[in-house]
Image (cartoon, rainbow, N blue to C red):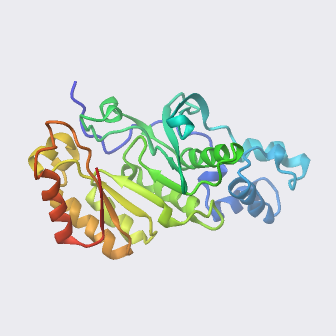
Amino acid sequence: MKQQLVFEAPRRALPPRHLADLDATGRAAAVSELGLPAFRAKQLAHQYYGRLIADPQQMTDLPAAVRASVADALFPTLLTATREIECDAGQTRKMVWRAVDGTSFESVVMRYPRRNTVCISSQAGCGMACPFCATGQGGLTRNLSTAEIVEQVRAAAVELRDRDHGRLSNIVFMGMGEPLANYNRVLAAVRRITEPTGFGISARAVTVSTVGLAPAIRKLADERLGVTLALSLHAPDDELRDTLVPVNNRWKIAEALDAARYYAEATGRRVSVEYALIRDVNDQPGGPISWASGCTARSGRWCTST
């Protein structure tokens, strides 16, 4: 059965509240609800984001008498690893996660000579219905919470540290789902990743990928976060892209490229354009060259990836 485009995720119960769902104001309010002094909010954030500890029983600067209540209120177990797949002599490791409600999604840690990258999911499944993508053909189950996204990052950082592989340096939102279709939670996750009171990873080391939700691209540009945008194009013209990337029936190539140009000009950051070559489908001579020319005509801040 042909999958249909889905922009609104099915309504399902949210996972329990987690510290990573909360910004600084929310953390202060949560600590107050527990009857703890205000400075505990910064302590909890430092333990979680700075020391990568998610079990209050290991937070030695917390009074032993309050650790259980803090754990219950702010540190539920959100993700359980159900499968690990390793390749490239251990340089690449995929984790399959099960959420509290049984939903599954994936993240991938990729080690390179000069950087360590984690590819994370923003949704369980995907509603963009691209026919060449197994996730898209499986449909959209639900949006991930901010904390479910952030926990993928923390888990990757812990794995790299514990295996003596160094620090996590780069995050790419290129796993399951269309990040800009889960806009508010992805935005909040990016803030947790990049803020000094969060993981403190440079915004330049964070890439948000999209199939071309033009209004959301412009909205993200106006946030001035400074992350890299990656536009998944995959076709040289609208006729073919209407089939390969069904969202093109809503926003055409020109609209997506114009939104990406706006992003580059508003943020001063480059935009990556991604093109998956599929034999005898979109690999015709001149195809990638034609869209590359279109990119160049719109802006000089482009980087292409095939």
Q: Is residue 19 left or right of residue 6?
A: right
Q: Nearer the viewer, residue 31 or 291?
A: 291
Q: Is residue 94 visible?
A: no
Q: Does residue 256 lie above or below 6 as drawn? A: below
Q: Is residue 274 left or right of residue 64?
A: left
Q: Does residue 247 lie above or below 101 as drawn? A: below
Q: Nearer the viewer, residue 305 or 51?
A: 305
Q: Does residue 119 lie above or below 136 as drawn? A: below
Residue 302: percent from left, percent from top: 29, 66
Count the labels in the image.
0
Determine the residue positioned at 36% across, 49% down.
181
Determine the residue positioned at 23% across, 43% down.
277
Q: Is residue 145 left or right of residue 263?
A: right
Determine the residue positioned at 13% across, 51% down.
287
Q: Does residue 264 lie above or below 77 as drawn? A: below
Q: Is residue 208 visible?
A: yes
Quarter of the image where one finds residue 80: top right
Image quarter of the N terminus: top left
Residue 262: percent from left, percent from top: 28, 71
Residue 244: percent from left, percent from top: 19, 41
Determine the residue positioned at 33% across, 32% down.
139
Residue 193: percent from left, percent from top: 57, 59
Q: Is residue 134 left or right of residue 196?
A: left
